[in-house]
């Protein structure tokens, strides 16, 4: 049975929905206001929400801020009188997975829409390999559980579980075997817990078990013991036994910490101690255990040295104007040229740099490299192109970010308008008030600003409008399936409409095929970037690539690339 919650005041709308739902498979509940919905959702889980959006966006008992909180983790369908650009914009703001026009409502449409909303939310909040909640959903559940425990004066435990020898199994028996081991471990951990507890996968071989409503610390130890026993049993894979075992760290609310981040960090630190003790065991957190950063100290030292010795270089990927085929700018992407390990991609060291607090130093180095490169091209009378530099959230917490940017501009003598900064939606939403101030200064200084990976965070439009932005970059995950997944197509179209509405440029990222390009052009997307045009290349190759793209060389020209489209 699929449980649906209808939110709205309009009895006719509710009746229409009810009539369209097959009573064999769906149960419909109803509340009139968002406040009532919030209360209900605190104690009961629904598979999907249907919200009367006309009512929601204009009616009295609807508080928009409350709405945002609701929409975050429950699949949501908006019911509309008609679909207008303003509504499209609001739907993005709320993160609704789907929408339906009231007059078009019928049984088949509704059930397709519900299934689609559920599977979109599933993809966003669950790990595809194990089917367990991912990090984002875990944090939501953990925060929720902490609030409940506080209210009812209960204890809860966070178990940080890491598999010993997983890398060995993966390397010697292959990735498929590795996947099987992860799936088996996931279901074994799940079986050690009650249904009301949460098991999540953080990524790699790391899992979290969230045990609520504990009696005494002893029962957290019991759960941990069960997990150690069951996960350590061999997994048979085509006749061979793969054996991994768990190292578990436990942190308790409220004894060890009272907020989600701290509980996770402490459980992680305790897990590290369990590993140090030989693995296949658990440890409770003790205040004398060091932070999780300790375990990465090896790479951390190397990274610090690399920043001192400047072992980084930027590669550049062209951004193309889809109206005339010209290259209008470049995105700078950092790589670490490690003396022994060769070229290391950013995904492998940026998160570590952030964790170790090295990002301000590394970020400054990157800004400097980009500005010096622009100045160098200018000096050699090469065409001047705008360069976009990625900034990490941490750089925004730096008081002197603006000074650093201005210093580099002054030192290299480049035009400020040749520099663009990219920041992700989530790093803005961390602390929108102060980010708005910094962005205001940057844009006054002439630097352009764009939002990266747009569509993956939960931006509030109210804020978006207040930021001095130049462009939105549509995240490559939406572009990837734009031709095959109707909802990705709809999202891309909506972001384009949203950008137009806000007077911003829109850049599609990760364009790999002529089909994707066709879709983007047909929907008036202004700019694009991706392997279809060029991979990121070293500075010396940039102008060869541009020549090829713009057709000043013997190689196939971009205009022919666009003509094909
Ligand atoms: P991003 O800012 O979203 O950068 C785009 C990534 O997509 C780049 O990966 C790029 O090489 C890749 N890409 C470009 N076109 C295509 C395509 O058609 N298909 C596919 N599959 N991928 C494409 P890269 O260089 O590995 O960078 C990964 C991420 O690391 C970046 O994502 C960004 O978040 C971060 N990063 C890179 N350079 C910097 C930097 O200088 N500072 C900071 N703070 N972060 C950086
Ligand atoms: Ca970027
Ligand atoms: Ca991006």
Image (tube, helix red, strand yellow):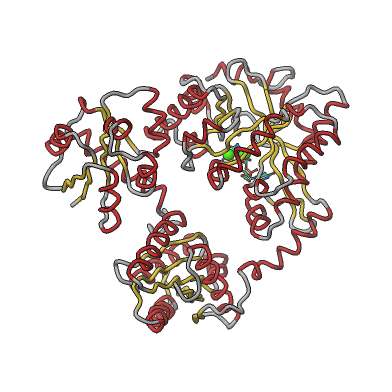
Closer to the camera, 73 or 339? 73
Does 117 sit left or right of 335 as displayed? Answer: left
Residue 512 visible in image: no
Which residue is at 79% across, 41% downward?
A: 369
Question: Is there any visible trace of residue 5 in the rendered image?
Answer: yes
Q: Residue furthest right?
A: 379
- The picture quadrant where one finds residue 228 is bottom left
- Quadrant hosting residue 180: bottom left
Quadrant observed for ligand 1 in the rendered image: top right
Q: Position of residue 522 (x, y in %)?
A: 47, 19
Residue 322 is left or right of residue 378, and the answer is left
User: Looking at the image, which residue is at 64% across and 54% down?
Assistant: 348
* Labels in figure, total: 0
Q: Position of residue 138 (x, y in %)?
A: 43, 59
Compared with residue 480, is residue 163 higher up or lower down, i.e. above or below?
below
Q: Position of residue 430 (x, y in %)?
A: 55, 47
> Where is residue 433 drawn, in percent x and y?
57, 42
> Is residue 510 shown left or right of residue 102?
right
Instruction: Determine whether 424 is above or below 547 in the image.
Output: below
Residue nearer the viewer, 532 or 31: 31
Q: Nearer the viewer, residue 136 or 192?
A: 136
Q: In percent of the image, x 80 and y 41: which residue is there?
A: 368
Rendering quarter of residue 543: top right
Q: Nearer the viewer, residue 493 or 486?
A: 493
Left or right of 535, for residue 91? left
């Amino acid at each position: 049975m699929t449980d649906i919650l209808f939110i709205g005041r309009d009895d006719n709308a509710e009746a229409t929905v009810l009539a369209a739902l097959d009573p064999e498979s769906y149960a419909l509940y109803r509340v009139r206001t968002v406040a009532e919905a919030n209360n209900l959702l605190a104690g009961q889980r629904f598979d999907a929400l249907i919200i009367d959006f006309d009512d929601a966006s204009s009616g009295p008992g609807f508080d928009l801020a409350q709405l945002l909180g609701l929409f975050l983790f429950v699949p949501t369908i908006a019911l509309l009188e008609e679909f207008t650009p303003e509504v499209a914009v609001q739907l993005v703001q709320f993160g609704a997975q789907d929408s339906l026009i009231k007059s078009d409502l019928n049984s088949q449409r509704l059930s397709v829409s519900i299934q689609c909303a559920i599977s979109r939310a599933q993809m966003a909040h669950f790990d595809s390999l194990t089917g367990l909640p991912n990090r984002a959903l875990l944090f939501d559940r953990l925060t929720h559980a902490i609030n409940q425990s506080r209210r009812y004066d209960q204890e809860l435990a966070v178990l940080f579980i890491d598999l010993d020898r997983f890398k060995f199994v993966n390397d010697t028996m292959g990735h498929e075997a590795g996947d099987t081991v992860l799936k088996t471990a996931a279901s074994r951990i799940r079986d050690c817990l009650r249904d009301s507890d949460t098991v999540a996968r953080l990524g790699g071989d790391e899992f979290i078990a969230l045990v609520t409503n504990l009696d005494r610390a002893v029962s957290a130890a019991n759960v941990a013991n069960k997990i150690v026993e069951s996960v350590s049993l061999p997994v048979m894979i085509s006749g061979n036994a793969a054996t991994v075992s768990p190292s578990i760290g436990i942190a308790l609310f409220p004894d060890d910490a009272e907020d989600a981040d701290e509980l996770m960090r402490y459980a992680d630190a305790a897990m590290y101690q369990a590993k140090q003790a030989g693995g296949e065991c658990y440890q409770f957190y003790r205040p004398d255990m060091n932070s999780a950063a300790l375990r990465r100290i090896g790479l951390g030292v190397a990274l610090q040295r690399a920043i001192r010795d400047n072992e980084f270089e930027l590669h550049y990927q062209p951004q193309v104007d889809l109206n005339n085929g010209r290259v209008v700018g470049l995105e700078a992407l950092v790589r670490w040229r490690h003396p022994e390990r060769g070229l290391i991609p950013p995904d492998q060291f940026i998160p570590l740099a952030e964790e170790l607090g090295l990002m301000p130093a590394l970020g400054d180095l990157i800004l400097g490299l980009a500005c010096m490169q622009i100045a160098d091209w200018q000096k050699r009378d090469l065409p001047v192109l705008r360069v976009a530099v990625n900034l990490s959230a941490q750089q925004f917490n730096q008081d002197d970010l603006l000074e650093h940017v201005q210093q580099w501009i002054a030192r290299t003598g480049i035009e400020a308008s040749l520099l663009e900064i990219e920041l992700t939606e989530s790093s803005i939403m961390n602390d929108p008030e102060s980010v708005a101030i910094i962005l205001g200064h940057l844009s006054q200084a002439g630097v352009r600003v764009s939002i990266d990976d747009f569509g993956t965070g939960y931006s509030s439009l109210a804020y978006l409008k207040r930021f001095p932005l130049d462009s939105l970059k549509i995240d490559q995950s939406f572009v990837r399936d734009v031709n095959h997944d109707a909802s990705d197509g709809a999202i891309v179209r909506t972001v384009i409409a949203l950008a137009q509405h806000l007077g911003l440029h829109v850049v599609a990222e990760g364009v790999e095929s002529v089909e994707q390009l066709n879709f983007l052009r047909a929907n008036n997307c202004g700019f694009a970037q991706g392997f279809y045009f060029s991979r990121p290349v070293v500075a010396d190759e940039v102008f060869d690539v541009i020549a090829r793209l713009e057709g000043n060389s013997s190689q196939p020209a971009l205009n022919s690339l666009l003509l094909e489209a």
